[in-house]
């Protein structure tokens, strides 16, 4: 059953993002992404700091070793991003970033395969993270999967917008996103068979997952929110951010009781 949960959870993120992108217009997608970025920042931080890290530190593992793992994880994902192998940008035309018109077309046209490779590696890592969480505890796995899904939707929708601006057809853009999303399923299945026998490593894998969530939230999502500083936009960002944190708290308590 655990393997089935992992497959369903890893498949859900890519499927939901593709379905949302297919059902909405480009104008609506642009607005949706802005709100979902705030929501996913709250969900990622809440999951890392309120669920994954406490679970890891309740184990018998050394706190010093766990903190060292957290630091190493942050540096690892920083280096992956520097190598353009851990892409999680959400920019698109007219998103208030200081890019010239046609920026996305150039990015997708010149580096489309690099973008797909980076997204696939990111999704593969997410799959391993979900597998490790489910192997630790089903409740923790569900919360972790929800956090990754909340982040995957704006990420994949943002990629979809970039590809459309670059001239890709809707069908081709959706297909590329779907294929990239399947890397999470591969990571989840591999993680189940490879990580499963090494139960002593679970606390460290949870800390690595936390470092991924914290890095994405702090290095990517929150800086994006600083680009919109009007009182109205700031209030909306805080509301969605708080909604993400509340979602994690409610989900954690509900699943703990069941």
Image: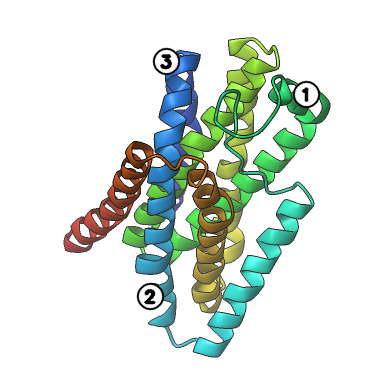
Q: Are marks 3 and 2 in contact (CB under 8 Å)?
A: no
Above or below: residue 176 compared with residue 225: above
Q: Earlier in the sequence, mark 1 or mark 3?
A: 3
Q: Which residue is mark 1?
A: 106
Element type at marker 3? helix
Q: Is residue 51 left or right of residue 123?
A: left
The answer to which quarter of the image holds residue 236 is top left
Q: Which of the two discs, 1 and 2, sits closer to the camera?
A: 1
Q: Earlier in the sequence, mark 1 or mark 2?
A: 2
Q: Residue furthest right?
A: 110
- Mark 1–mark 3 distance (CA, rounded to whole Å): 26 Å
- Mark 3–mark 2 distance (CA, rounded to whole Å): 38 Å
Towards the viewer: 231 or 36: 231
Above or below: residue 20 compared with residue 139: above
Q: Is residue 103 left or right of residue 35?
A: right
Q: Which residue is mark 2?
A: 54
Q: Residues within 10 Å of mark 2 (few under 14, many from 20)?
A: some
Q: Is residue 147 left or right of residue 177?
A: left
Question: Tag on residue 242?
Answer: none
């Amino acid at each position: 059953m655990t393997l089935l949960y992992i497959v369903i959870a890893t498949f859900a993120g890519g499927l939901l993002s593709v379905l949302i992108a297919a059902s909405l217009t480009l104008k609506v997608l642009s607005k949706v992404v802005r709100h979902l970025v705030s929501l996913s920042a709250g969900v990622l931080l809440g999951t890392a700091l309120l669920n994954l890290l406490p679970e890891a530190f309740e184990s018998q593992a050394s706190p010093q070793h766990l903190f060292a793992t957290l630091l190493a994880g942050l540096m690892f994902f920083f280096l992956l991003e520097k190598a353009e192998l851990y892409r999680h940008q959400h920019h698109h035309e007219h998103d208030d970033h200081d890019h010239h018109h046609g920026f996305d077309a150039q990015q997708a046209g010149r580096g489309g395969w690099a973008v797909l490779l980076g997204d696939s590696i990111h999704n593969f890592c997410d799959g391993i993270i979900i597998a490790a969480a489910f192997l630790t505890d089903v409740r923790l796995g569900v919360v972790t999967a929800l956090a990754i899904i909340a982040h995957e939707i704006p990420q994949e929708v943002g990629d979809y917008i970039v590809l459309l601006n670059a001239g890709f057809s809707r069908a081709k853009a959706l297909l590329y996103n779907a294929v990239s999303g399947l890397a999470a399923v591969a990571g989840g299945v591999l993680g189940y068979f490879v990580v499963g026998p090494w139960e002593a490593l679970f606390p460290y894998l949870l800390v690595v997952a936390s470092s991924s969530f914290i890095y994405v939230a702090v290095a990517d999502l929150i800086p994006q929110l600083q680009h919109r500083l009007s009182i109205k936009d700031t209030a909306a960002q805080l509301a969605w951010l708080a909604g993400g944190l509340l979602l994690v708290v409610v989900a954690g308590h509900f699943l703990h009781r069941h």
